[in-house]
Image (cartoon, helix red, strand yellow):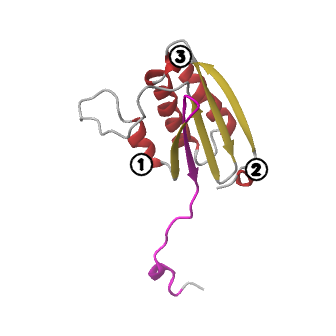
Amino acid sequence: MDSSEYDRGEWVLRLAGSPDQVVRARRLVSMTLGRDHPLHDDCVLLTSEIATNAVVHSRSGDGGAFTVTVAYSARSVRVCVQDEGSAEVPCVCRASPDATGGRGLPLLEALAHRWGLVREAGSNKIWFELVLEPAAVRVSRLAGVG
């Protein structure tokens, strides 16, 4: 998807790397899209997951900051969280059923149309895209419709 598909704009917010700022990241996405946007709920949930990862698993949570970028249109949304880096590469690890964490990237993998991770210049940039897709209708249901 290129940037021309996000015709409604782009918003960027830099936040302190503390847990209470995850709420502000979610609020940015919610206010940018509006509650009536059909991708609102999934975007807010996934933003919460990747912003939490920035605070918990990167140097952003050690007195640093992270940046949230939201680009959107009526049919698609792209959210990116850039943190201050980590010693380990973020992984899509499978959490045990009784674990209290470790489900952020697997959830991202399950819900996002596309997502990715870029590590450069000492930072992690995790992004996702959600796209409205037409509902699949079996051809047999259309037979006889004229």
Q: How far across and down, in percent of the image, does residue 56 sit?
A: 44, 22
Image point (68%, 42%), residue name: 71
From what the image shows, is residue 56 above or below residue 91?
above
Q: How far across and down, in percent of the image, does residue 74 sit?
A: 69, 51
Image point (51%, 53%), residue name: 113
| Image quadrant occupied by the N terminus | bottom right
Mark 2 or mark 3, earlier in chain? 2
Residue 56 belongs to the span the image colors magenta:
no
From what the image shows, is residue 132 above or below residue 119?
below
Image point (57%, 48%), residue name: 129
Q: CA distance from mark 2 to mark 3?
A: 31 Å
Which region shows up in magenta? 120-144
Q: CA distance from mark 1 to mark 3?
A: 26 Å
Q: Amino acid at mark 1?
A: Ala
For residue 36, what is the image quadrant?
A: top right
Judged left or right of residue 81, residue 9 is: right
Q: CA distance from mark 1 to mark 2?
A: 26 Å
Image point (63%, 45%), residue name: 37
Judged left or right of residue 101, residue 130 is: right
Q: How far across and down, in percent of the image, does residue 64 sit?
A: 57, 16
Q: Secondary structure at mark 3?
A: loop
Residue position marked by numbered label 2 in the rendering? 7
For residue 123, what is the image quadrant?
A: top right
Residue position marked by numbered label 3 in the rendering? 20
| Image quadrant occupied by the C terminus | bottom right
Q: Amino acid at mark 3?
A: Asp
Residue position marked by numbered label 1 in the rendering? 110
Q: Residues within 10 Å of mark 2 (few under 14, many from 20)?
A: few
Mark 1 or mark 3, earlier in chain? 3
Q: Amino acid at mark 2?
A: Asp
Q: How far across and down, in percent of the image, does residue 3 sit?
A: 71, 50
Q: Nearer the viewer, residue 78 or 87?
A: 87
